[in-house]
């Protein structure tokens, strides 16, 4: 069923081509679509599911709603074939993984069929606050560090694009998902114009032209794919592997005479290491948590707190 | 009962987006929840009521898409109210329906336990959606146990097609056997879309109220009689099921027989398509003779059921030798992988080749409060006050984790206020005790505990987080929003007047986007002795309309990487790779920022400013 036009690689083509039409009817084709809440995972899977239905296949599309709206991971399983029983795809059995966000793609990589699975990914990065939590000096961002090159080294059929940027170039960043659909269309052997027809029906009428262009560009991108061409974000140190920043500050020193018990430092200390003692004076009660952020020093209206440079 | 959409068909493009009501005999892609709604509508349902709750919410949302002249559909204040409204419809002689999530049945159970004695006049059907795997709930309870307890039949559809057919059938069974009927779904079924063959609506004439006090008025003398009737009803249902299509025997070899139901059936079929399978379309009651016959026809019987060993135990009571939970887990959601593991352990399938792990480090992405969420400032303030906070259920429950980390307890809907009272009345807590509760939750189950707190003179502060919507479940109206399920104008609760009338003396309504006022008001409220209520007022930024004001930006020159703004947990704010004294400077994603200004208000060095001139939201 899957039929990837991987330039210059007959091997990949034959492995993907194992899913011929007859095969697809026996074993369902599994496409896993993942991303972050609000990105359009459900829309992308609806286009695919509709297309498969129109082609006469049985389709099951299973999604996780729940927390989707609140910026969590969203995923949608689309399975089609002559008979589809389970609504979900087992680990290691996805024929295609479509990731609308880079780190989400990485999260689900283990769902791809070893060797033959095809990854189609947007390199867009949506950094959650969670990845920016470590307040220690020199701490690394917690966002996934793997680059397209890293993944292309492990997943034979890896196609990545900064879809948002490409679509923006066409005049509408919102067509990014259609660009990904263009890429996906090369992995499944439905006629190109059937894709175009379904997409045209499902996008706002005014945007049909731009979406058709984005679709073409997605197909093109796979045609001429070269991992080296994918502009990836900066290399980042892995969490825990950061070069420690040299700390040259002492712990906060509190001048009790100047403290007027206003509580501001206690309220705002991100690590909650300050309290007011019995005399209503600020004290550093949990020095081990202090990250030397200097916030209390800056906020104290009476200059009662100082973080001094080490000798 | 047919498998969904076995035939190949060419879809008319118009049918892609189903518009309910027209062209009844078409095949359409439907989510399980849409199909349940369709089934209720086709069965001629006239009264439908529900309170939202994942994964059941879309059932009532879809029912409301059918014309108002076909049926009355409403959001009720809670699940018990919804069931009681449906019971009223049944008394009046029309087919009635309610839907809820599994824990909703706890709230509605008091009414169900009596109504099952009463039976029905017009049909009474409850769609109850379990959440195995706890995708979005506070527990993983198994609704089938309620079926036993209430002696109420529980139908178990497997896919959207069956969801429609079983729901329709449930209405017939309800009237035929004089019983409420539960249609049980799970997250997986509710949220899976597949092709469904729809039918036409049956117009059922109203039966009129039936004056029959012995049946309709549950006083001890009447109830005693009815209990006997219930036991007889169970017997009649068992007999019916012996030959019903709800039980499907798929014949295979005689070595192994699998008894399964609900979505577990799909995983079994995926793995052992040719096995002998007894597919149960019902989990209470069960056809004993059919079960015995099936078990006798094979050498080994395995029961594959998600959650509790309900069927397994029933079979064991019948003295049949079966295996079940020795192979499959009692907790968590089933999948092909989980069922395969059990079948491998039973030595029925060869173990799977181990998949080589890839070298990637997945990053956690927990759900978050939205950028500009009106709940944020309250929890910033509570954190600073060092208060003991009993929380409740809603979006704001997310403030229990980093970075806000300002909620100490969360039990069930409406628990916060009485939990706070109990802590206060224990007299052992030196910190201020605060209950935080959302508007929808307050109207659901928050009023009786507030009355109770005043009555018993508890020294607590209640924070009513009024974001003008039921946000957590996707933005449903409630009596505080001024609109009903169909979006029509409705009476809007006046919280201040309501709260005053139960005897609260200290009430203040404040704007949650004013950090200083939130701090100050909370301090005053917690200093007050007795029950004080602070209403924190700001609409949700996501529902019913997505709000977007002019964005803020970080002045990188001034940013000292202090991370104060990061404490809000706003998803629009993240790190840049630029450091100041070893701390990351921050940046604001213009597209994501809605301009609430909270980060600018808490920032330490005037480093955050509006991109455009400020404008009120
Ligand atoms: C008994 C019960 N019914 C329904 C739910 C589902 N549920 C969880 S939170 C919520 C609504 C919360 O609304 P609100 O209190 O207004 O808070 P918001 O999400 O708007 O912040 C609902 C209906 C539940 N958990 N328990
Ligand atoms: S949906 Fe509304 S209430 Fe929920 S997190 Fe977002 S802004 Fe807050
Ligand atoms: S103003 Fe600040 S806190 Fe508010 S949404 Fe924008 S970035 Fe987030």
Image (tube, helix red, strand yellow):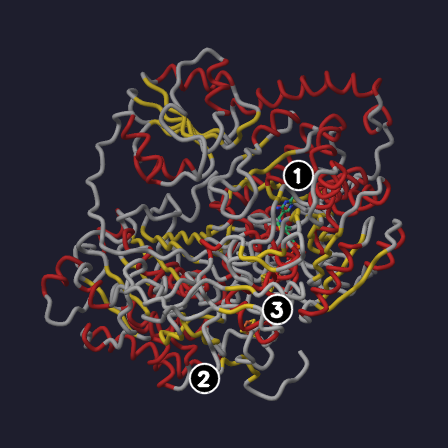
The residue depicted at 78 percent of the width and 17 percent of the height is B225
Nearer to the camera, A92 or B298: A92
Nearer to the camera, B428 or B329: B428
B42 relative to A44, above or below: above
Front label number (2 vs 1): 2
Q: Quadrant of residue B239?
A: top right
Q: Secondary structure at mark 2?
A: loop
| Mark earlier in primary sequence (2, 1) | 1
Give the residue number, with chain letter if any, for mark 2: B557
Left or right? Give the position of B33 relative to A181: right
Q: Which mark is residue B541?
A: 3
| Mark earlier in primary sequence (1, 3) | 1
Give the residue number, with chain letter if any, for mark 1: B125
Left or right? Give the position of B224 relative to B188: right
Answer yes or no: disc 3 within 8 Å of ligand 2: yes
Image quarter where the C terminus of chain B lies is: bottom right
For the residues marked 2 and 1, what is the alpha-carbon distance in whole angstroms? Answer: 64 Å
């Amino acid at each position: 069923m899957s039929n990837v036009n991987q330039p210059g690689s007959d091997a990949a083509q034959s492995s993907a081509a194992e899913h011929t039409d007859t095969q697809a009817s026996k074993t369902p084709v599994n496409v896993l679509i993942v991303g972050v809440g609000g990105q359009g995972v459900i829309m992308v899977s609806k286009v695919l599911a509709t297309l498969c239905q129109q082609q006469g296949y049985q389709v099951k599309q299973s999604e996780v709603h729940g927390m989707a709206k609140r910026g969590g991971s969203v995923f949608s399983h689309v399975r089609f074939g002559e008979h589809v029983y389970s609504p979900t795809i087992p680990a290691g059995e996805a024929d295609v993984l479509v990731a609308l966000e880079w780190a989400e793609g990485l999260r689900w990589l283990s769902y791809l069929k070893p060797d033959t699975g095809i990854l189609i990914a947007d390199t867009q990065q949506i950094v959650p606050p969670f990845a920016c939590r470590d307040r220690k000096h020199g701490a690394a961002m917690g966002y996934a560090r793997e680059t397209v090159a890293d993944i292309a080294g492990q997943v034979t059929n890896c196609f990545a694009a900064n879809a948002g940027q490409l679509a923006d170039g066409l005049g509408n960043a919102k067509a990014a998902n259609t660009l990904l659909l263009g890429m996906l269309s090369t992995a499944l052997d439905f006629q190109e114009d059937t894709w175009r027809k379904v997409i045209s029906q499902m996008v706002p009428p005014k945007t049909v032209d731009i979406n058709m262009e984005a679709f073409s560009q997605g197909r093109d991108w796979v045609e001429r794919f070269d991992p080296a061409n994918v502009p990836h974000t900066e290399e980042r140190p892995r969490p825990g592997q950061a070069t420690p920043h040299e700390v040259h500050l002492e712990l906060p020193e509190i001048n009790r005479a100047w403290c007027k018990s206003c509580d501001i430092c206690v309220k705002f200390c991100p690590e909650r290491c300050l309290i007011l003692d019995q005399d209503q004076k600020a004290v550093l009660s949990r020095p081990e948590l202090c990250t030397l952020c200097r916030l209390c020093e800056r906020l104290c209206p009476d200059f009662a707190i100082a973080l001094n440079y080490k000798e | 009962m047919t498998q969904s959409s076995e035939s190949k068909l060419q879809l008319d493009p118009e049918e892609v987006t189903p518009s309910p009501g027209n062209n009844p005999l078409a095949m359409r892609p439907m989510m399980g929840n849409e199909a349940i709604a369709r089934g209720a509508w086709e069965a001629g349902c006239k009264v439908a009521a529900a309170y939202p709750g994942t994964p059941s919410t879309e059932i009532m949302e879809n029912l409301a898409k059918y014309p108002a002249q076909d049926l009355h559909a409403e959001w009720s204040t809670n699940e018990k109210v919804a069931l009681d409204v449906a019971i009223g419809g049944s008394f009046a002689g029309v087919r009635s329906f309610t839907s809820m999530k599994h824990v909703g049945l706890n709230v509605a159970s008091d009414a169900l336990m009596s109504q099952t004695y009463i039976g029905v006049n017009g049909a009474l059907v409850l769609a109850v959606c379990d959440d195995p795997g706890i995708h979005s709930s506070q527990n993983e309870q198994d609704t089938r146990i309620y079926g036993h307890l209430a002696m109420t039949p529980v139908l178990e559809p497997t896919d959207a097609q069956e969801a429609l057919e079983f729901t329709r059938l449930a209405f017939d069974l309800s009237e035929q056997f004089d019983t409420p009927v539960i249609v049980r779904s799970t997250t997986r079924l509710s949220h899976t879309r597949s092709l469904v063959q729809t039918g036409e609506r049956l117009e059922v004439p109203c039966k009129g109220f039936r004056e029959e006090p012995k049946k309709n008025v549950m006083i001890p003398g009447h109830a005693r009689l009815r209990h006997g009737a219930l036991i007889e009803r169970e017997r009649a249902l068992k007999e019916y099921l012996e030959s019903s299509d709800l039980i499907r025997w798929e014949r295979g070899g005689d070595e192994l027989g699998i008894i399964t139901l609900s979505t577990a059936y799909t995983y079994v079929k995926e793995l052992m398509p040719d096995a002998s399978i007894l597919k149960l379309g019902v989990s209470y009651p069960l056809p004993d003779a059919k079960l015995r016959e099936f078990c006798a026809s094979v050498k080994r019987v395995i029961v594959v059921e998600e959650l509790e060993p309900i069927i397994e135990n029933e079979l064991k009571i019948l003295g049949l030798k079966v295996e079940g939970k020795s192979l499959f887990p009692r907790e968590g959601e089933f999948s092909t992988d989980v069922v395969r593991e059990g079948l491998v352990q039973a030595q029925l399938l060869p173990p799977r080749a181990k998949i080589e792990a890839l070298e990637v480090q997945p990053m956690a992405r927990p759900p978050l409060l939205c950028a500009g969420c009106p709940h944020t400032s309250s929890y910033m303030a509570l954190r600073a006050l060092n208060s003991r906070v009993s929380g409740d259920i809603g979006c704001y429950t997310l403030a229990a984790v980093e970075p806000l980390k300002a909620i100490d307890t969360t039990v069930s809907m409406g628990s916060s206020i009485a939990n706070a009272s109990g802590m206060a009345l224990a007299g052992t807590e030196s910190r201020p005790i605060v209950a935080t509760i959302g508007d929808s939750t307050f109207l659901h189950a928050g009023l009786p505990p507030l009355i109770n707190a005043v009555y018993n003179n508890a020294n607590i502060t209640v924070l009513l987080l009024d974001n003008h919507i039921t946000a957590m479940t996707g933005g449903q109206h409630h009596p505080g929003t001024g609109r009903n399920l169909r979006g029509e104008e409705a009476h809007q609760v006046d919280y201040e007047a309501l709260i005053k009338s139960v005897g609260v003396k200290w009430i203040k309504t404040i704007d949650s986007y004013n950090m200083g006022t939130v701090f100050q008001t909370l301090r005053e409220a917690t200093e007050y002795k007795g029950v004080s209520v602070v209403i924190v007022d700001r609409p949700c930024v996501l529902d019913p309309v997505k709000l977007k004001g002019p964005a803020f930006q970080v002045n990188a020159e001034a940013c000292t990487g202090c991370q104060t703004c990061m404490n809000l947990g706003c998803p629009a704010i993240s790190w840049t790779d630029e450091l100041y004294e070893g701390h990351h400077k921050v940046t604001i994603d213009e597209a994501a920022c809605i301009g609430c200004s909270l980060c600018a208000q808490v920032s330490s060095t005037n480093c955050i400013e509006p991109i455009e001139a400020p404008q009120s939201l």
